[in-house]
Image (cartoon, helix red, strand yellow):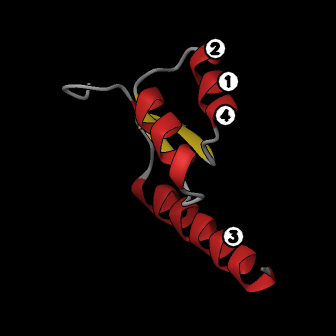
Amino acid sequence: MLPEMDGFEICREVRRHSDVPIIFLTARVAEEDMLRGYALGCDDYVTKPFPLPVQYEKVNAANRSEQQYRLVI
């Protein structure tokens, strides 16, 4: 858990100012939490435990998408 804000609040604030990729890494596995994360603008929602090599590739994919988006603009 984060000390002052939860991940949903952070996602909301980041989305107000930026389009950077956001990936939730969380122990919250409820479907409504996942849907809330996506509704707030996250790019992926990963629940613990997760294999580190898979997460590494998810981050690479998010970065590739961001770079391709910037090339189009």
Residue 38 numbered mark, or none: 4
How far apart marks 3 and 2 lie (CA) works out to 26 Å
Element at badge 4?
helix
Q: Amino acid at mark 2?
A: Glu
Q: Residue at x 41, y 36 (%)?
A: 10
- 73 or 3, nearer to the observer: 73
Q: Quadrant of the rendered structure where residue 38 is?
A: top right
Dot 4: few (<14), some (14–19), or many (≥20) neighbours within 10 Å?
some
Amino acid type of disc 3? Answer: Ser
Q: Which mark is residue 35?
A: 1
Question: Left or right: 54 with respect to 66?
Answer: left
The Cα atoms of the two marked residues, 3 and 4, are separated by 17 Å
Q: What is the C-alpha distance between the residues marked 2 and 1?
A: 5 Å
Label 4 sits on what residue type? Tyr
The quarter in which the N terminus is drawn is top left
Measure the alpha-carbon separation of dots 1 and 3. Answer: 21 Å
Considering only vertical position in the picture, is 51 above or below 25? below
* Looking at the image, residue 6 lies above or below residue 24: above
Tell me if label 2 and label 1 are in contact, CB under 8 Å.
Answer: yes
Residue drawn at x 55%, y 44% as measured from the top left: 16
How crowded pointer 2 is (Cα within 10 Å; few <14, some 14-19, many 20+) is rated as few
Assign a secondary structure to mark 2: helix
For the point 60% across and 58% down, which residue is it?
19
Residue marked by disc 2: 32
3 or 4: tag closer to the N-terminus = 4
Q: Would you say 33 lies left or right of 70 here?
A: left
Please give the label number shown on residue 65: 3
Residue 64: where, in percent of width, then height?
Answer: 64, 75
Give the left or right position of residue 46, taking residue 35 as reference.
left
- Residue 33 locus on image (x, y percent): 57, 19
Mark 1 residue type: Leu
